[in-house]
Image (cartoon, rainbow, N blue to C red):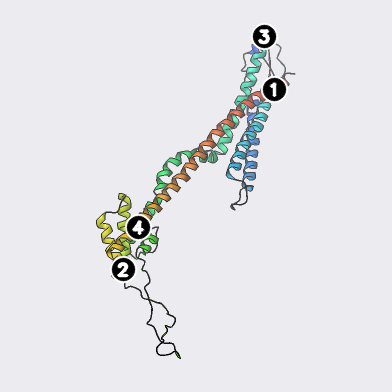
Amino acid sequence: MAQYGVQPPIGVIDESSGLSGVSWGAIFAGAAGAAALSLVLLLLGTGLGMSSISPWSSQGASAATLGMATIVWLAFTQIAASGMGGYLAGRLRTKWTGVHTDEVYFRDTAHGFLAWAVATLLTASLLASVVGSIVGAGTQAGATVLGGAASTAASATAASASNAAGPQGGSDASTGPMSYFVDSLFRREPVASTPAATATPGAPSGDATTAPATPTVTPMPASGNPMATDAEATRIFLNGIRNGALPPEDARYVGQLVAQRTGLSQQDAQKRVNDTFAKTQAALKDAQAKAKEAVDTARKASAYASLWLVVSLLIGAFVASFAATWGGRRRDL
């Protein structure tokens, strides 16, 4: 039509005119609509999800229910937003004349896909922090394994440094993750003594009865500076934890300290040292196992979230392309 000086109608492109078959105006219009609807639905889903969470164990949705609901909502968001964006891109495009039906179908599909791509990039730029937190959680999980597994040991090391300062540095050895074990190490058992039997007033002289005995507690005297002893025992235990075992000479030396503080025999004191060190190692291993379990749970959640996000985006791309072909057919009627 153009070669004979007749201009095509507005909104119609003749294939022989050499103009591009891409209607960027329709693509950006569809992308804007899809991005806006996607943002609204994401905010709505966030509000619904937060309202279903409760800090009380007996209330609120479970983690499995919340995860499944999140997957379903992401899929619904992509279907609704991408479908609307693709339909707008196909319905608002220019009409092509002299183009084969298959070519029109391909162009409509491309318009829908481009509208979805622009909308996705726009939404990602607006929600960069959210997407970054999802992707970054998996990357940070590996580093957190080491930090989480060694958190107890690091705290114990900090406590040892505080205890090493002693009274001169103004530190108090009563705080720290190993305080309980050190306290139990130097715990003195109360010694009960029973008074001698006394005759009950009015009783015959040949028949003496004992009055009710009132046990008295006789504490054992502590030798040396207790704070310095606690700090020294803490450092010895930390060194044993780092090496994986308490050396016999250290166990014997700490046993001597325990015997001086508690009045136990050297054998019993050394047995208490070994038992307390075993409990300390068990507590440390339990803390490390819990830290690794928490990190592994976070890693799996991040991986599943990323995979399902990819699946929902692919669904959105397909829906946008299909909706654009439908809108394009309605445009050409």
Helix, strand or loop for disc 4: helix
The residue depicted at 63 percent of the width and 41 percent of the height is 45
Tell which circle, 1 or 2, labels the residue nearer the N-terminal end: 2
Element on which disc 2 rests: helix
Instruction: Compute the Cα span from label 1 to label 2.
Output: 88 Å
The numbered dot on residue 326 is 1
**Badge 1 amino acid:** Trp
Q: Is residue 133 visible?
A: yes
- Residue 3: mark: 3
Q: Quadrant of the N terminus?
A: top right
Q: Which residue is mark 2?
A: 261
Instruction: State the CA–CA distance, disc 1 to disc 4.
Output: 76 Å
Mark 1 and mark 4 in contact? Answer it, CB < 8 Å.
no
For the residues labelled 1 and 2, say whether their Cβ atoms are less than 8 Å apart.
no
Distance CA(mark 3)–CA(mark 4): 100 Å
Which residue lies under the disc numbered 4?
275
Of the image marks 3 and 1, the number of the one nearer the N terminus: 3
**Residue kind at label 4, given as amino acid type:** Asp
**N-terminal of the two: label 1 or label 4?**
4
Query: Viewed as shown, does residue 157 lie left or right of 302?
Result: left
Residue 178 picture location, percent across and down: 38, 58
